Image (cartoon, rainbow, N blue to C red):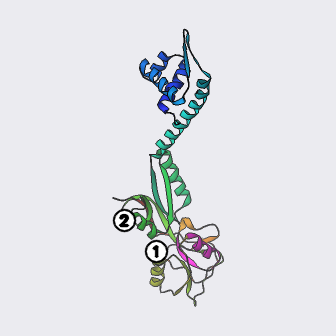
Amino acid sequence: MLYDTALLRTFVAICDCGSFTKAAREVNLTQSAISHHVKRLEDQVGARLIVRQTRGMRLTEQGEILQSYARRILALYREAEQRLGRDRGGAVRVGVPEYFDLHTLSSLLRQFSAHYPEIRLHIELGIGPDISALLDEGELDLVIVSHEIGEGDGTPLCRERRVWAAGRGMKLKPDQPAPLALYPPFCRWRQLTLEELDRAGRTWELAIQSAGTAGILAALDAGLAITISPRSTCHRRSRHWGAPKRCPPCLISSSSCAAAGTTRRRRIIWPR
C-alpha cells in the first residue's frame, strides 16, 4: 500500500498539534476535511489510528507505529522535492582550451558558482578548433577561445603573451631544422608557428604532434622540440625566448628571455 502523502501530512499535524482544530489551522483545511483525511488514512491502513476523548485525543498502537513512518516518509519527500527543485536550475556546458591558465579558470568557475549556486557546470577541455566546433554544433553553451586583437566577438577576458618556449636544456643548431612540438594541422597555434618560421626563413621538422597540451609540454620538458605557446602555459622547467616575431637564436645557453610583445585576447563566446 502506498499511503497518500497529503493524508500523512494531515495525520502528523494532528499528532503535533494534539487536536483536530489546531491541525486544521496548521494545514489550512476545514475541520471536516481533517476528519475526512483521517478516515481515508484509516481505510488505507485498515485499522483505527486516533481515538477522540473528552479531553483531546490519543493515538492507538497502530497510530503510534504509523506516526514514526509518516515522519520519515515526509522527510524523504521534502528532501527529494528540494533536490529536484535545485536540479531544475539546469546545467551550463562550458568549453575551455587545454592551455587556458588553470588559476584564471578556477577563479572564473568560483565566481560563477557563487552567483549561480543552483546551476551545474559541465566543463569540456580541448584544443580551440574542437571547442569552437562543439559550440557551432550546439553541444556547448559558451566557450573560452583565443582571437587576435581586433578579431572575433564575445566578451574579452584577458590578454596574454605568446612566446617561443622550450625545455631549459634545449639547444638549436643553425645547420639543422628546428624540431617542433605542434598541435594537429587545423589548430591556429600550429599555423602561427609555421608562419613565423617561414617568415624568418628558418627550416623546421615535426618532432612531436599532440592533440593535448600535456604532450606538447612533455616534448618541451624532454628537450625534444620548441613551440609557440601562451606564456602562462610555460612551466618552471621551461624557458621562453620572447615574442613569436623574434625567431629564437640558433644557440641558446642562457635562461633569460626578452619581453614578448605579441598578444592574443581571450574571449568568452556564446551562441547568438
- Element assignment for label 1: loop
Comparing 99 with 243, the one in front is: 99
Q: Nearer the viewer, mark 2 or mark 1?
A: 1
- Estimate the x, y position of residue 245 in percent, counting from the top left: 47, 76
**Magenta run includes residue 228:** yes
- Element assignment for label 2: loop
Quadrant containing the C terminus in the rendered view: bottom left
Q: Tell me how far mark 2 sits from mark 1, CA to CA.
A: 16 Å
As drawn, 155 above or below 219: above
- Estimate the x, y position of residue 128 in percent, counting from the top left: 46, 68
Residue at point 64%, 66% (across, down): 236
Comparing 215 with 73, the one in front is: 73
Q: Which residues are magenta?
A: 213-229
In this view, which residue lies farthest toward the front?
46
In this view, which residue lies farthest toward the top?
54
As drawn, 162 above or below 43: below
**Magenta run includes residue 20:** no
Q: Give the residue pinned by disc 1.
A: 187
Q: How many C-alpha atoms fall within 10 Å of the one at disc 1: few (<14), some, or many (≥20)?
A: some
Q: Is residue 171 left or right of residue 84?
A: right
Residue at point 44%, 23% (across, down): 36
Mark 2 or mark 1, earlier in chain: 2
Q: How many C-alpha atoms fall within 10 Å of the one at disc 2: few (<14), some, or many (≥20)?
A: some
The reply to whether residue 147 is in sight is no
Q: In the image, what residue type sits under mark 1? A: Cys
Q: How many numbered marks does the figure carry?
A: 2
The reply to whether residue 257 is in sight is yes
Q: Give the residue pinned by disc 2.
A: 152
Q: In the image, what residue type sits under mark 2? A: Gly
Comparing 5 with 80, the one in front is: 5
- Estimate the x, y position of residue 25 in percent, counting from the top left: 45, 19
Q: Indicate the quadrant where residue 45 lies.
A: top right
